[in-house]
Image (spheres, rainbow, N blue to C red):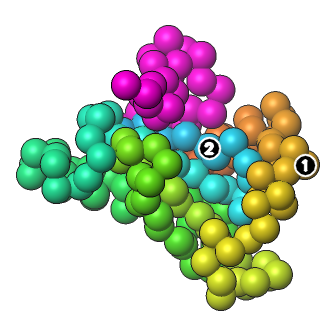
Amino acid sequence: MEECLICSRIEDIKAGNNPYLVAELETGYIVIGDHQYFKGYTLFLCKEHVSELHLLDPMFKAKYLVEMSEVAEAVQRAFGADKMNYELLGNGDAHLHWHLFPRRLSEPNPRHPVWWTNREEMYADEVRPTEDELAELKRVLQEELKRMGVVQ
């Protein structure tokens, strides 16, 4: 069986070795995306290893969806997005995880889906956050999550 990338990242979080961690919630982990073509790109990783929403216990699923929505709201506020894009795909990594993309009207193609962006641009080394940029992204999002009462 192939190793799950999301489970590996969660194990890194638990071991204190994931520098992208923003916060832990009841149902998942908030992490800044490895690439920041869309500034503020954040993921919400489910604590349960399942491939589909309908496989979650109904109470856990309800809480997971509420927490994802709160994280998305915090991302929008923290990073000044004009619109949020929500993606729950799982074709590549079959472990529930939301991609939360802050979108801005000032982008080259604000009406196109994020996946229409040229992969070489979206995943270029130039859009990987530096250590200082990552710290600032995390700080801004953590402050908004606290202000909203999502985290302490």
Residue at the spot of label 1 = 126
Q: Which residue is rendered at x = 82% and y = 81% of the image? A: 108
Rendered position, 45 above or below 113: above
- Most extreme residue toward the top is 15
> For mark 2, does the 10 Å Cα neighbourhood hold few (<14), some (14 to 19), or many (20 or more) residues?
many
Residue 81 place in picture, x, y as percent:
64, 72
Q: Which residue is rendered at x = 37% and y = 42% of the image? A: 95
Disc 1, SS: helix
Q: Which residue is rendered at x = 51% and y = 56% of the image? A: 99
Could you tell me which quadrant the N terminus lies in? top left
Residue 54 place in picture, x, y as percent:
16, 56
| Residue 103 visible to an observer of this rendering | no
Front residue of 116/35: it is: 116
Residue at the spot of label 2 = 32
For the record, the magenta segment spans: 1-25
Q: Amino acid at mark 2?
A: Ile
Q: Is residue 82 left or right of residue 49?
A: right
- Magenta highlight on residue 85: no
Could you tell me which quadrant the C terminus lies in? top left
Front residue of 43/137: it is: 43
Residue 83 place in picture, x, y as percent:
57, 78
Q: Amino acid at mark 1?
A: Glu
